[in-house]
Image (cartoon, rainbow, N blue to C red):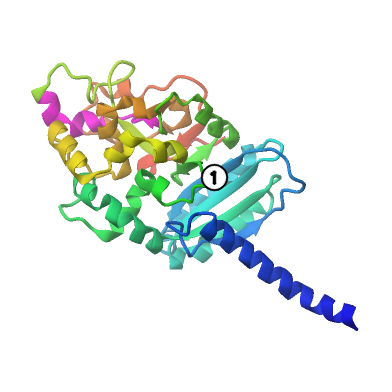
Amino acid sequence: MGRAGWARSQPCALALAAALAVCAFYYLGGGGETFSTATRRLRATPPGPARRGRALHLLVLFTKAERSPALRDKARAALRSLLRHGRLGRGDALHLHLVTDGASRDIGEGLLRDALSRAAFPHQVITHDVNELTEKLFPIVEAMQKHFSAGTGTYYSDSIFFLSVAMHRIMPPEITQIIQVDLDLKYKTNIRDLFEEFDNFKEGAVIGIAREMQPVYRHTFWQYRRENPHTKVGEPPPDGLPGFNSGVLLLNLEAMRRSKLYNQLLEPATVQKLTEKYRFKGHLGDQDFFTMVGMEHPELFHVLDCTWNRQLCTWWKDHGYSDVFDQYFRCDGEVKIYHGNCNTPIPED
């Protein structure tokens, strides 16, 4: 009788214990501070016996998907290519962070559930409510938004486009590294190899990012370049400073938390001083911030090879820069990740 009663109550007890464990990890383990309280685990493949491995945290933004079949198609294609080439090491687990809104959550979770059902490695999906993250981000990035957002105002909803800038203040300290990627990507190699780029960061570097492959910042820095005719700012590689593209971002959160210099650069007065120095007004969010900071403090960045973010957009070639375009667009080597920015088709296999 007693044993039967215990058996009936066991599922409830296990469910309660699991719920408490999740709360303990994300609330108590994270200091009860800035991690989204709307975080939910969709599905986890148990990693089995304890093994030494690497926690691979990968984050994507997936909002307004209910209005955009194209976005859903891009997400599906990106996931398919990521899983096709994904081979994790012994003890590794992939933690997919989905930043989404209420209307898009079910769509995103459905896409992930379908794709990951065929994954051959341990994985976990964690959803974050975009509104809760925005609430935490806005006080940090409000002052910089007017310098790096389209239009003249500072809009609350635009804060999410600066998530990577302040990710170290949003994620709990247990997460020390994370990669944020756009959805318009096609993976041609093992995602684990990209995580190994963290091991190549030099002392003082906090972010890994590839160069911009169009003369975007040759254009944006036009006034500074006119006033400083011998500057490398906006010039093409290998000797110039063409700026960065944020389609693939390696964020060493632990290093970002420790870096006194990086956190000083988030201060409104510092941002204002740099934008005045470089006569800068952008509209690409975090990418603009990283580009401007990179002109002043290149030591904060580990520059990824172009093959890790092979951008395909050629918009600027037909808008005033055809004479220099190829100097920016050239990328030698076997492509590891294609980036179909500005809705550019990605080559088929």
Quadrant for the C terminus, please: top right
* Residue 323 visible in this rendered orientation of the protein: yes
Q: Is residue 247 visible?
A: no
Q: Is residue 181 above or below residue 16?
A: above
Residue ID at (41%, 58%)? 63
Question: Does the magenta segment cover residue 181?
Answer: no
Expressed as whole percent of the image width and height from the top left, the position of residue 248 reads 44, 38
Q: Which region of the structure is painted magenta?
A: 208-226
Q: Quadrant of residue 93?
A: top right
> Is residue 215 inside the magenta stretch?
yes
Q: Residue at x 45, y 41 (%)?
A: 253
Image quadrant holding the N terminus, namely bottom right
Q: Nearer the viewer, residue 247 or 184?
A: 247
Q: In the image, what residue occupies the spot 12% across and 18% down?
A: 229
Residue type pointed to by label 1? His
Task: Measuring from the top left, give residue 154's x and y in whole percent.
Answer: 20, 55
Reply above or below: 314 against 168.
above
Describe the element under mark 1 as helix, strand or loop: strand
Task: Place residue 55 in its image quadrant.
Answer: top right
Q: Is residue 211 above or below residue 289?
A: above
Query: Mark 1 sits on what residue?
Result: 57
Q: Is residue 300 left or right of residue 25?
A: left
Q: Nearer the viewer, residue 25 or 324?
A: 25
- Is residue 273 rendered to the left or right of residue 54? left
76 in relation to 107, above or below: above
Residue 313: percent from left, percent from top: 35, 36
